Amino acid sequence: MILTINGRQREIPLADGLNIEQLLEHLKLDRESVVVELNREILPADQFAETRLRENDVLELVQFVGGG
């Protein structure tokens, strides 16, 4: 499946019907510290498991990091 993630086109070797939660797991990102924008709409975290991705979807993933 081809997705555009943070401006870069990537081939994700997972089946069609992949959901956001599975994608984050594949990318080794903690769902609790990531904001997901899917096709220009911010997606609430409680919708990650039910939101299926499709070929050529565009995502922006913003990960919060602590520090100071």
Image: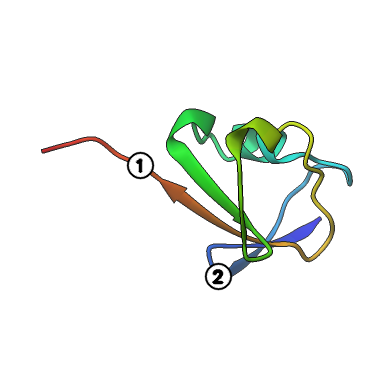
Indicate the position of residue 47 as horizontal and vertical percent values: 70, 36
Indicate the position of residue 30 as horizontal and vertical percent values: 49, 30
Q: Which mark is residue 8?
A: none
Residue depicted at x 53% and y 34%: 28
Q: Quadrant of the C terminus?
A: top left
Q: CA distance from mark 2 to mark 1?
A: 18 Å
Residue depicted at x 73% and y 31%: 49
Indicate the position of residue 31 as horizontal and vertical percent values: 53, 32
Mark 2 vs 1, N-terminal side: 2
Indicate the position of residue 33 as horizontal and vertical percent values: 43, 35
Q: Secondary structure at mark 2?
A: loop
Quarter occupied by residue 56: bottom right
For this orientation, the residue located farthest to the left is 68
In this picture, residue 13 sits left or right of residue 10: right
Could you tell me the amino acid type at mark 2? Answer: Gly
Quarter occupied by residue 19: top right
Which residue is the site of mark 2?
7
Give the image's coloring scheme.
rainbow
Vertical comparison of 62 with 45: above or below: below
Numbered disc in front, either 2 or 1: 1
Vertical comparison of 11 with 48: above or below: below
* Residue 48 seen in this snapshot: no
Could you tell me the amino acid type at mark 1? Answer: Phe
Q: Quadrant of the N terminus?
A: bottom right
Which residue is the site of mark 1?
64
Q: How many marks?
A: 2
In this picture, residue 42 sits left or right of residue 35: right
